[in-house]
Image: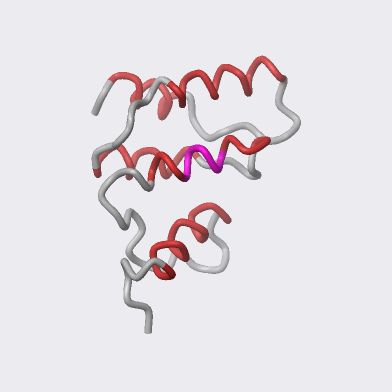
């Protein structure tokens, strides 16, 4: 796994909307340091970095970065209690025909 991905993952989940502007900017810079595409290992590690909300759109950037890797990352339904971003990743894979859902 590339160092820039390790740094982002080590920083933990994205903060919520109550985080300071500096904290959000720091996470954005970390995320922008990761070049595309990501590997399967990196994509699986990045999935753990979604926070409780969209973090002013940063979660969408993370989702799109994850999707540059080998898809799908989440091959089973994450369940109704899962983070909304895990559900969204899974649903996008189903809707894109990457996972056959019965």
Q: In the image, is residue 38 above or below residue 97?
A: above
Quadrant of the rendered image containing residue 75 = bottom left
Question: Residue at 45% of width from left, 62% of height from top?
Answer: 92
The quadrant the C terminus occupies is bottom left
Majority secondary structure in the magenta region: helix
Tell me: 80 left or right of 5: right
The quadrant the N terminus occupies is top left
Q: In the image, is residue 97 above or below residue 24?
A: below
Question: Residue at 24% of width from left, 39% of height from top?
Answer: 39
Question: Residue at 29% of width from left, 36% of height from top?
Answer: 37
Q: In the image, is residue 30 above or below residue 58?
A: above
Which range is magenta? 59-63
Tell me: 97 left or right of 82: left
Tell me: 29 left or right of 93: right
Residue 18, given in percent of the width and then of the height, sits at: 75, 30
In this view, the residue in front, 63 or 85, is: 63
């Amino acid at each position: 796994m590339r160092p820039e991905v390790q740094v982002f993952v080590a920083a933990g989940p994205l903060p919520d909307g109550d985080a300071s502007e500096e904290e959000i900017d720091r996470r954005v810079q970390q995320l922008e340091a990761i070049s595309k595409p990501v590997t399967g290992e990196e994509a699986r590690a990045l999935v753990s970095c979604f926070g409780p909300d969209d973090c002013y759109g940063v979660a969408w950037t993370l989702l799109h970065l994850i999707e540059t890797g080998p898809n799908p990352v989440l091959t089973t339904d994450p369940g109704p209690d899962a983070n909304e971003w895990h559900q969204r990743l899974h649903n996008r894979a189903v809707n894109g025909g990457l996972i056959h859902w019965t």
